Amino acid sequence: MTAVALRRRRMLRRLHGGDALQTAALIVLAVIVLVAALAPWIAPHDPNGLDLSAALGGASGDHPLGTDESGRDVLSRMIYGARTGLLGPLVVVAVSTVLGAVVGVTAAWCGGWVDALLSRAMDLVFALPGLLLAIVLVAVFGPGLTAPIAAMSIAYVPYVGRLVRNVAVQEATRPYIQSYRVQGWSGWTICLRHLAPNIAPLVLAQSAMNFGYSLMDLAALSFLGFGVQPPDSDWGAMINNGASALLQGAVLPALAPGAAIVVAVVAFGIVGEGVADRVAKREA
Amino acid sequence: MTEQPVLAVEGLRKTFGDHAAVDGVSFTVPPGGSLAIVGESGSGKTTTARMLVGLERPSAGRVLVCGTDRTSPPRGRRSRLARARDVQMVFQDPYLSLDPRVTVAGAVEEPLRLHFDLDQAARHARRDELLDRVGLGEREAAALPRRLSGGQRQRVALARALAVEPKVLVLDEATSALDVSIQAQIVELLRELRATLGVAFVFVSHDLSLVRHVADDVLVLRRGRAVESGRAAAVLAAPEHPYTRLLLDSVPRRGWDPARIAADRRALA
Amino acid sequence: MRESALLEIEGLTVRLASGAARPVLDGVSLRVAEGETVGLVGESGSGKSVTGRSVLGLMPDGAEVTGSVRVAGRDVLALPPARLREVRRREVAMVFQDPRASINPVRRIGDFVTEGLRAGGTPMRAALKAAEELLESVGIEQPRRALRRFPHEFSGGMLQRVMIAGALAGGPRLLLADEPTTALDVTTQAEVISILTRLQAERGTGMLFVTHDLDLAAAVCDRIYVMYAGRIVEEQTTDGLFAHPRHPYTAGLLAATPRLESDEPPRGVPGRPVSLAEDPEGCAFAARCRFAAPGCAAERPPLRPVDGVSVACLRAEELVHD
């Protein structure tokens, strides 16, 4: 953690009263999750219902966020888009966290050549842009959500793995871990029961931030046309569709999903930082 | 007929790169005995302690407990557990030596579960007995380490180490992070435990005035080598090696002359 | 016939913002005369370090402070920042516990030692000359070359000498030493203490020596204050304190200190120190005290003169410890 980042964080807290900002971010996330879960009940229109006569209609009582170039209700598409928008990152974060934790703890605990091998492997994945990997996988397995999610899951492993390794190396030198070794426990048991749970909060903080980043990456893939395929709605794909509407003066079809992405990513970032802060405070 | 020592160390050596942290250290501890390994930072005392419990692998030399060699790393669960029942350790920093997520009762039960085949009632009884022995009650047993003071945590670490019923207990500066009034409590407790349990102690310490009150024998280390050893009372009363004398003179007290000590120190270097 | 003291703390009370039950400092008063060496002894949580830092005007964040801390007659708690900086530069200097954490690792030794001088307007050349002499006086070999070195090239003991040189550079009248040798080995401790006391005597600098080690304080100081749970419980000359401690806590501390020259094993003080979350009525030490009478837990004993020493104990007259 750099001094500048710390100071900035402290300033932010002073500006917003810290906990208020956290609470707000949590509420935003809760709303997004609820909306995604209840999509069929709260969406005012069929997200895929075409109505070419109402194409590119601005905001109105019937369509609060207007309609896109095919006359589909933007609000309803956004509500359904939250489902794919959350599901993808959820899988990415779950897979990358588990894999990263396993790789990181193994590298830290074994040390020596195991550590060298795993660390260099993670560097290799790091060097490979996640988006590029996703595009390659899409080319091999065809478009759809599966290939981008698999690619992102792998691309995010080193973010978690490197952090876990560094934290675990330090944690393993702590006397409480060493005393378990002296007591005669196996490395497996110590890592699983004592080391992993104690570094978990820090890892979860990183994963919460990864959630936001992977949401953005997956949206970018959809925007590029590699992710969610039409007619399914997705925030990234909606921006892509909305781009042409922009030229015709309709701002909402592109702006609304864009804003949703920004809000979700920022909210996950704040929650992640909040968890990290709390961990730091507990350590101190 | 001499008694077989409970702990025997022969020609112990540990190198890190070109640097020999411990260089040819030998000593023995009789059953129920108590040895203090004394030195300053860089003397190799902590590395020696870590080799005794198997946290560090010696570059050369042997560590024997009751005549059984335990120098190379254990193979398999049986030998790992047998090693653990030979030697246990209490670490210096009470704030880092307990898992923050495990209650005091849990910390003492863990080794019992690993080493002994007890049913739950028997295990709880043994746990309470151990905690009682180190002066902790029910209230502390239910608490997480962060609710406890440094002295109380060190008591937990002691109870946890004794739960394994080791033949030798290594105390690595186990009281030096504590306040004087609390340190003396722990010293009293250690004297009492030694008298009642018959476990042999190896104290690793920098504090000579403390050594006098806890150890029968003393081994003075300097830069990885033993410079003097013998009965604690004799060595402290009439040190033979100038370094031992310097260490003794360095202990602050009234009428202390730090300038002379500084001159002696330079003469010795 | 008390002349005005170099350092005079009066009724200093510091309460943390974060709802601790008792104040960190509770009516602390102490004085250090010109050229005098005074010990401030206490265990962790006693408030000794907070007291030491208050002299530099350093207070815990958001703390509520009452009382006064006068250095050469000026109350540092009331000074505007510019004047406070001047006091820190000219009057008071501090030697911290951990030299490695207190000296900027990426700047050269010369920068550290001359910092205060240059801020005070001394030209670079003269400041470097002075720094060289200072380093020589704290026993650093080849001081001119040392000026160009970095902190990581020095051992802990050498670095603590550098810190002492830096502290003395501005020619302060008062030196605050906060556990200056706790991080060092015993033989190094002796060396650093000998340098510190020699220079202090040569220059006539007053010193407040903050430590947990009663014997070290005894070796260095003329007079000792003993703190417990944010209050001063006893003040005496060093000889008096060791011969006849008047407060049961002081007596307990002395009995708990292991001694080379005695066969008597150290005796612990039962119980544990008062945490910030507890605020016992009456004497804070009563719960651990062998001599506690029913009145002790009810009434808070003030620090008062008894037979020429100051003690905060209700039973000070009847009890004599040895």
Image (tube, coloured by chain):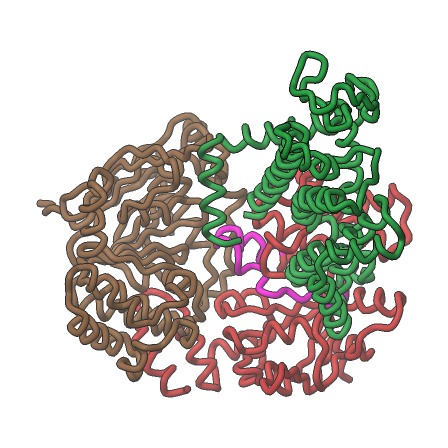
Chain C as rendered: colour: brown
Q: Front-most of C26 and B197?
A: C26
- Residue B60: quarter of image: bottom right
Tell me the shade of chain A: green
Does C107 sit above or below residue C289?
below
Using the image as rendered, state which of residue A17 and residue C196 is in the foreground: A17
Q: Is residue A11 left or right of residue A139?
A: left
- Quadrant that contains the N terminus of chain C: top left
Quarter of the image for residue A29 reads top right
Q: Is residue C73 left or right of residue B269?
A: left
As for residue B173 lying within the magenta part, the answer is yes
Left-right relation of B204 to C186: right
Residue B87 visible from this viewpoint: no
Region of the chain picked out in magenta, as a range: B163-189
Q: Is residue C105 above or below residue A229?
A: below
Chain B, chosen colour in render: red
Task: Give coordinates of residue B68: x percent, y percent.
Answer: 82, 78
Using residue B84 as the reference point, say whether residue B9 is left or right of it: left
Q: Where is residue A261 in the image (x, y as percent from the top left)?
A: 66, 36
Residue located at (52% from left, 33% from top): A18
Percent x, y for residue C64?
35, 32
Q: Nearer the viewer, residue B100 or A196?
A: A196
